[in-house]
Image: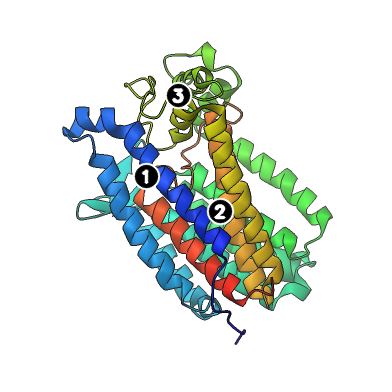
Amino acid sequence: MPTKRSTPDFILLIVTFTLLALGLIMVYSASAVWADYKFQDSFYFAKRQMLFAGVGVVAMFFVMNIDYWTWRKFAKVIMIICFVLLVVVLIPGIGTERNGSRSWIGVGAFSIQPSEFMKLAMIAFLSKYLSENQKNITSLRKGLFPSLGLVFLAFGMIMLQPDLGTGTVMVGTCIVMIFVSGARILHFVGLGVLGLLGFVALVVSAPYRIQRITSFLDPWSDPQNTGFQIIQSLYAIGPGGLFGLGLGQSRQKFFYLPEPQTDFIFAILAEELGFIGGSFILLLFALLLWRGIRIALGAPDLFGSFLAVGIIAMIAIQVMINIGVVTGLMPVTGITLPFLSYGGSSLTLMLLAIGVLLNISRHSRY
């Protein structure tokens, strides 16, 4: 059992709470008009997000006090539970469909998204596997294929919903973990070619994905349909200028940008707080990444290092994809911005992950 320090990483904790507080403010600012119109309550989304945040913070502190090596013991069980939930969500009458994806299971007035929790379950399981089989990771048959097999099985089940965004984040996170574990570059080149072919096949198999690609390249070619969200997002970011229009003064949230409190919340933030506000958010994420890397480097064992790398990679990849979509640099995918976007499953998962990272920091040498 690793030796425990008395206190977790203070900077990581402060950065997390700062992002969480800014997220609550921006969820209210971005959603107030839409919530008042649809639910006659401008605080509808803000109140629910505060509830999610409260549950998430309690879970974070609870997990922070559970020694991280405990997750190695239960990694298989957690993985099995998440696979079962991925099956259950596909059953009509149980799984709830939103925007063409059957990704949620309703629980009373709330719902959970099993694919979100699969990301953390996969990180824990892969950390266990890599820490126990690192000497075999340079072998395709003994190391690489067994680790990737389970990853792509989960990816395939997530695609049945379908949820390309969440699946992409999970696969990207696992590839980073496998790369850090010492896999051969040549193997990654070959897998990269296969992955590219598979991505092309996924895009070609669904017309709406082709439309997303073409709209990303030229959103103004179809401004009222596939290019609508990107154009409205850019219309929000542009007028924000250096200092923004002011908190609460967004114009695009007045029914121009659909449900701006979710995937496109960064566009509203940039409109209201400007380049300075957007840069501050990116700085906070950079600080979080830095502290996570330090924790991974200082972890007393391989399992802790891989677990920290996986959590940080998941957050970093999700941030890059979300902001890339919002700024028109990537095709539109349903990816939330960690800690800021509205969404119970996403927020709870991120706070749980930070709780695990904070516990690793209590054992870290740095």
Q: Left or right of 224: which side holds 49? A: left
Marked residue nearer the N-terminal end (3 or 2): 2
Camera-nearest label, 2 or 1: 1
Quarter of the image that includes the C terminus: bottom right
Identified by mark 3, the residue type is Gln
Identified by mark 1, the residue type is Leu
Q: Residues within 10 Å of mark 3 (few under 14, many from 20)?
A: many
Q: Residue furthest left?
A: 40
Residue at the image position 36 percent from the left and 28 percent from the top: 248
Marked residue nearer the N-terminal end (3 or 1): 1
The spot of residue 189 in percent (x, y) is 79, 49
Residue at the image position 48 percent from the left and 41 percent from the top: 335
Query: Residue 320, which numbered label?
Result: none
Q: Which residue is mark 2?
A: 170
Q: Are marks 2 and 1 in contact (CB under 8 Å)?
A: no
Q: CA distance from mark 3 to mark 1?
A: 23 Å
The answer to which of 121 and 187 lies nearer the viewer is: 121
Residue at the image position 53 percent from the left and 12 percent from the top: 221
Identified by mark 2, the residue type is Met
The spot of residue 1 in percent (x, y) is 60, 87
Q: Which residue is mark 3?
A: 229
Describe the colour scheme in one phrase.
rainbow
Marked residue nearer the N-terminal end (2 or 1): 1
